[in-house]
Amino acid sequence: MSESAQQAAGVFPDEVVTSAPVRVLDLPSGAGRFALITLDNGFDHTKPTTFGPRGLVNIGAALDEVARLADSREIVAAGVTGKPFIFAVGADLKGIEVVTEREQAYAIAKAGHDVLRRLGELSVPTFAFINGAAMGGGVEIALHCTYRTISAGVPALSLPEVFLGLIPGWGGTQLLPRLIGPDAAVTVIIENSLSQNRQLKGPQAYELGIADALFEPADFLEESLAWTASVLRGELVIERRHYSHEQWDAAVARGRQVADAKVHGATPAPYLALDLIAKARTASRDEGFAAEDEALTDRIMSEELRSGIYAFNLVQKRAKRPAGAPDKALARAVTKVGIVGAGLMASQLALLFAQRLSVPVVMTDVDQERVDKGVRYVHEQLELQALKGRLNADKLNRLKALVSGSLTKEVFADADFVIEAVFEELSVKQQVFAQLEAVVRPDCVLATNTSSLSVTEMAAALEHPERVVGFHFFNPVAVLPLLEIVRAQKTDDASLATAFAVAKQLKKSSVLVKDAPAFVVNRLLTRFLGVVNEVLDEGTPVQVADGALEPLGLPMSPLVLMELVGPAVALHVSETLHATYPDRFSVSENVRRLVGAGKKAFYLPGTTTLDPEVEALLEIGERPSTAQEVRERALSAIAEEIDLMLKDGVVAEAQDIDLCMILGAGWPFHLGGITPYLDRTGVAEKVTGHRFLPVGSASLPA
């Protein structure tokens, strides 16, 4: 066992230790004896297998045994697989949080290489049988093997490190580009990771060349062993491609473009990963792994990683146990869903409810043409998924049959959950709820998808206001995982529990919020956009105002965000908030002019060039600000607003605001949430006189 692995083993006191038992079996067709290592942390599939230092020690011990068997010619090959449903999901991030010295970080980095590289340096071929989810170090252990098979049922495979502020530092940047080519490696390591940690399914990983063979889950291990026997007997020959210098250069250049577009240079992780990918073209195995050791050590000691882990823990833990949610045992069953409206948002909701709940979903609207259009949208989206192989013919027909339309709300009489997605006008929504109450059962939950209006006021005139909840989705519904669930003044626990249960079935992450104007995400984004619009009105050039926050690495600039939301919607929300908080939320006359002229964006389509027609509409002052002044002003405004929201109890804790902004607004993981960022930069104390989080939190220096 390597000295580095032994040294690292003393760092993590609470490691869930992965075992690596070895069993020797006979391969089919008389191909010889085979040593199979199974990675298992002793839990069922609810606790994915990870690698901490003691787990690496166990894998190293297993490889000692395999090496002995190989050297004595008792086996012809060796392999590694995982427990049911899980191959391995990488390093144990809990342990990294306790690392305080660079020497400890270096020991961890080197231990991974010292152990895993042996799979590629044994005297016999090695095989990885990827039977379940594989991420980070789990993918890297497979890359060190000579060959790989993968199950068609693998739900997720990725190298997510740069998403967290790390780099794939146990061989990923060196082995993957040589295996599948530098351009495909850039897609997996940089592009997928920075696209909200996009995952590959088993067939996609196979198509990319990460695996050499694809088998169905039912007999995956049996088929993998038969395939292994064919390879060892010479009946199958796996050829590896070679890539030109021009292909390497083009791939790395594309990777830099992707990183620039995603993070604007705000975090070094993707750029370090690209440097390592470029190095893999000419570096020896020792040189490449040594470079990964140094880069990974630096990343482990970085502020970005602490921030990324804080954000990761919010998404993986707090999001699964929403603060303040009532006892889930109070939730009522939902066997039919009604949707008032058949526009784009309503149609997206109908598609989601049908797919996730598998219950009848009926839409209503004011005329047959709109109803037909909404149902047609859902059916077309389902057919598109079938064309892509995501639905078989039977499931396609069953889902299509679940979605229907009607002109009358009487169809909601037996519904358990009805959500409205009509025009964002309080009187319109009040009228809808009054009509619904006349036909639905007393225990039917009535939900509103409002983005800014008072849920309490919507329910005020109802006989049963206690069953009204806010259920605020973010657009596009299928992509953004956040649901703001709003408790109005009279909402009862049963209705709220039902809302949380439905959200879980929809596979959304929920945050309980108080019924306050614009709730969390839209309130903060509107305050932020308000500052940008104010400085534009004062005379700051559009490019300066819009680019001022670029150093943070936000997913899009303020004016591009406004284009996505729609200037009319942004104006409406700003007017709603201005009516309640006139001292903090302004209404931009220039945005009003933009909306009045029917313009959808400041820029020409697909560019960052100011539309000349928009430029002619703008009336600007003579008090321009610098980018730094805009940035300071925007961050100060956000800090002030968060402080007021927490004092008013809009959410339980600052962590819930961070979770909302990460999942609903794409706030970057490498910043670790908005409140720790404001703490670290001193903005929080400057504006409010205090930090939002305690010193010593995962994302804060002690």
Image: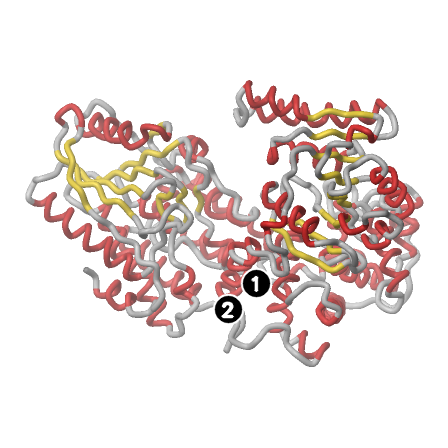
Which residue is nearer to you in this view: 671 or 402? 402
Pointer 2 residue: 698
- Image coordinates of residue 172 in percent, x first then y, are 37, 49
Q: Judge whether 241 appears above or below 696 on screen.
A: above
Pointer 1 residue: 672
Dot 2, crowdedness within 10 Å: few (<14), some or many (≥20)?
many
Which residue is nearer to you in this view: 483 or 664? 483
Q: What is the three-letter code of the residue carrying label 1? A: Gly
Which residue is nearer to you in this view: 477 or 485? 485
Q: Is residue 250 visible?
A: no
Q: What is the three-letter code of the residue carrying label 2? A: Ala
Closest to the camera, between mark 1 and mark 2, is: 2
Dot 1 falls on a residue whose secondary structure is: loop
**Residue 504 falls in image quadrant:** top right
Is residue 251 shown left or right of residue 661?
Answer: left
For the N terminus, give its image quadrant. Answer: bottom left
**Residue 590 falls in image quadrant:** bottom right
- Image coordinates of residue 375 in percent, x first then y, are 74, 25
Dot 2 falls on a residue whose secondary structure is: loop
* Residue 231 image label: none
Mark 1 to mark 2: distance in Å? 9 Å
Q: Residue at x 89, y 50 (%)?
A: 461
Q: Is residue 263 visible?
A: yes
Dot 1, crowdedness within 10 Å: few (<14), some or many (≥20)?
many
Q: Earlier in the sequence, mark 1 or mark 2?
A: 1
Contact (CB < 8 A) between labels 1 and 2? yes
